[in-house]
Image: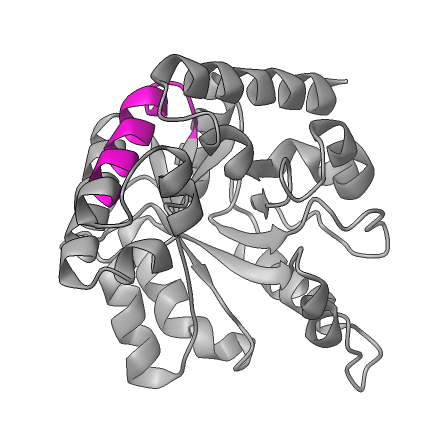
Amino acid sequence: MTLTPFGTRLRAAMDSRGPLCVGIDPHAALLAQWGLQDDIVGLERFSRTVVEALAESVAVFKPQAAFFERFGSKGVAVLERTVADARAAGTLVVMDAKRGDIGSTMAAYASAFLDPASPLFSDALTVSPYLGYGSLKPAVDLARESGAGLFVLALTSNPEGAEVQRALREDGRTIGATMLAHLAAENADAAPMGSFGAVVGATLGDLSSFDLDINGPLLAPGIGAQGATAADLPGVFGKAVRNVVPNVSRGVLKHGPDVAALRDSARRFADEIHAAVSA
């Protein structure tokens, strides 16, 4: 099965539902805040509630695989159901697994998340290029074949990321800029938007020294609990702001388990984002 390319499907979802991406991050403290036990029952209740509350209104869900994997095979089974339920409701799923390796191992990671026959098949996958961008080739190839997408770590919101991502190559270009250039090449001639995106933190301030116009989506964590706001987006992303997929996790999830409160919070963020990127 080959789907319509991820970039095309994402552009349509962003235009119809707005660009908000909500993380599904069932860490222990958040489960406790919801009044749930840190066990498989709590995990399933949390995940199902988020999907039921928001699947018909947000463009993208981003489940963090680690918070499910920590429960072993039963947690992975909950992740499978979460992905399937979200996609069945018409929401795109970006699996936040940040996989990165070489050769057959990278191919196996790609198969787990980008092969339509896999129970974990997602619309896109976050990947780490820091074994060299070429190490991602198995994932790039399978994403093209299946109509899925990738989000490559380029300029991340964590402070530690700068020591690698802003390091200079011999040619004077930073590692982060090099990753953006690779993605622009992957997306060349794609319309309305390419399927190969970058992860670029919304907390990073002025990024005008980087060419973010990669003709692909920019997954932007950092809004809400990490301190960035919707109003910051134009200043950070400049002319590429229309392709930004702002991710909010704790800022929305802290309002659960009340379904109405979750919906209200997501709606507020969506309205603020729309106002900021449409100004």
Residue at image coords 25%, 25%: 89
User: What is the quadrant of residue 163 in the picture?
Assistant: bottom right
Q: Up-down: is 44 above or below 199? A: above
Task: Check residue 98 for magenta coloring.
Answer: no
**Type of colouring:** one colour
Task: Check residue 51 for magenta coloring.
Answer: yes
146 lies left or right of 278 = left
**For this rendering, which residue is in front, 27 or 121?**
27
* Residue 264 placement (x, y as % from top left): 49, 14
39 lies left or right of 91 = left
118 lies left or right of 192 = left
Q: Up-down: is 264 above or below 127? A: above
Range of residues picked out in magenta: 43-59
* Residue 157 placement (x, y as % from top left): 67, 55
Residue at image coords 43%, 73%: 100
**For this rendering, which residue is in front, 90 or 22?**
22
* Residue 15 placement (x, y as % from top left): 51, 21
In what quadrant of the picture does the C terminus appear? Answer: top right
**For this rendering, which residue is in front, 112 or 160?**
160
151 lies left or right of 142 = right
